[in-house]
Image: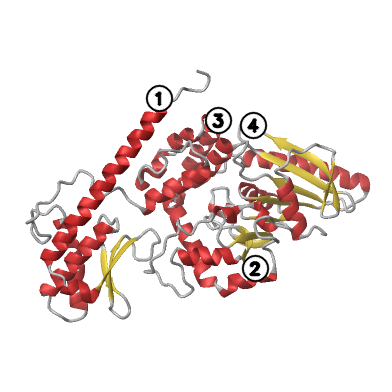
Amino acid sequence: MTVSTTDYALLAQNSYQTPVVDKLVKLNGVEYTTLAAADNPHTGFQATAYRREDTGEVVIAYRGTEFDREPVHDGGVDAGMVLTGFNAQAPDAIAFTEKVMEKAKFLAETRGQPLDVTVTGHSLGGTLAEINASRFHLKGETFNAYGAAGLLHGVPEGGNQVIDHVRAGDLVSAASPHFGEVRVYAAQQDIDTLSKAGYRDDSGPLSLRNPLKATDFSAHAMDNFVPNSETLGKSIISPEGQALYEEHKGMVDRYRDDVRDIRTTISAPWEIPKAIVHTVQEVGHNVAEKVEEGFHAVEKAASHAVHEVGETLSHVGHEISEKASSAWNTITHPGSWFDDKPKVAEATRLDQPNHPDHALFQQARGGVHELDAAHQRTPDQRSDNLAASLTVAARRDGLTRIDHVTLSDDASRTYAVQGDMQSPLKRVADVSTQEAVATSVDKSSANWNQVAEQNQQAHAQLARQNEQQASVQRSSPMPGQ
């Protein structure tokens, strides 16, 4: 095989162009003939098969997610993969691959050349490349693909048939396990972005970090992998890119693990009970049949899959980047705690049963008492002071409950944690231990009132903004009027 990684990258990029069958295409000094092309407007599936003129090698390039021509179709497929585990374009891709392989076999026999068919693709196209490589025992290379091994197509994880090139800061390629060997490359921009989001090479599970803030959508572009990249100036596939990843492997791997954990949570209703594969695939087929109705069809067909993460797809008609941002924001920032809560009277303390947030205080105090027991000390007023300070910090930082209370290694900070300690979806609020134990419950109760008022004002302002936006939309003429 003489097709290089650069050749695969350029072909994957070229697949985004409108193909002309039998047309000669020259990329990086290599000439190819467009052997076949597919374009299904109903599912958004598109692919191009290229035949190398000098060797007769055939490369099938599956087109990835694009937002200019197929935002609803490709976005619906992307959402469907996450919600149902089924890729709605897979049947089209398999049929096209079979057609190309038959044609390539005929040409190879006619011209006395060996049969050599490989696959490539970027993003959603990379997913299809992995699926078909597994199904037809083909080799190939993908770029920032959504891993097919995490879907319900019977594709195994790992192996060496396919090389999956991914950029460290890419969200899509981190979300699902891959068929093939994953090679990670980093740019300095990835390291800087991850650092600003709280990621460190030596960070632990309780480190304060925000996967959503670490997301850089430019890291997903196919342009990252081609020579003379407009994004980076050169291809990220280089010894320097590999070395930078290895240097910061700790922070990069933690980010990518966080992304996968979040995606698994969204996919939980099919990811966990693997025994219901048949039922889920039927849902996926329903999504494929209804994809022309837009993302609302996906939402309806897989509504059970998003029940546990709230209304994350309430605006599913938006492009996939907006949908992902909105959905993950809902996951990582639960509903406003101050909704429907009466304002507390000034004289009410957090440790009094009639305080609106007494239940949260009790959760904090229970966690503090567990710390007291672990350190063989008897709970006292300082314990209540610490619990009250944690309650205020929790409400300030958006927690709706306190499941755990823990200390930093040097005990200088105390953390209130909502959720599983090991999960990237956990919410964490922290206080200075020394300051917290010295702050009276009365003082913390007053601080709670201030936080409640600030959040109520913010909520009211947001409501006004939403109403103003809705008013503008209602007054705007509809297209064609």
Q: Please name the residue that numbered disc 4 is placed on.
A: 41
Badge number at residue 475: 1
Write the residue at 51% across / 72% down: 250
Which mark is in front, 4 or 2?
Answer: 2
- Residue 58 in picture, x, y percent from top left: 80, 49
Gap in angstroms between the C-alphas marked 4 and 2: 38 Å
Write the residue at 19% across / 56% down: 450
Check the image and name the residue furthest to the top: 481
Q: In the figure, is residue 377 to the left or right of 254?
A: left
Mark 1 / mark 4, whichever is N-terminal: 4
Gap in angstroms between the C-alphas marked 1 and 3: 28 Å
Q: Are marks 2 and 3 in contact (CB under 8 Å)?
A: no
Mark 2 / mark 3, whichever is N-terminal: 2
What is the crowding at mark 4: few (fewer than 14 residues within 10 Å), some, or many (at least 20)?
Answer: few
Q: Which kind of residue does numbered mark 3 sit on?
A: Glu
What is the crowding at mark 1: few (fewer than 14 residues within 10 Å), some, or many (at least 20)?
Answer: few
Mark 2 / mark 1, whichever is N-terminal: 2
Q: Which kind of residue does numbered mark 2 sit on?
A: Gly
Q: In the figure, is residue 178 to the left or right of 160?
A: left
Which mark is in front, 1 or 3?
Answer: 1
In this rendered view, identify the residue nearer to me: 197 or 54.
Answer: 197
Gap in angstroms between the C-alphas marked 4 and 3: 9 Å
Which mark is in front, 2 or 1?
Answer: 1
- Secondary structure under badge 1? helix
Q: Please name the residue that numbered disc 2 is placed on.
A: 241
Visible in this render: residue 147?
A: no
Gap in angstroms between the C-alphas marked 2 and 1: 52 Å
Gap in angstroms between the C-alphas marked 1 and 4: 34 Å
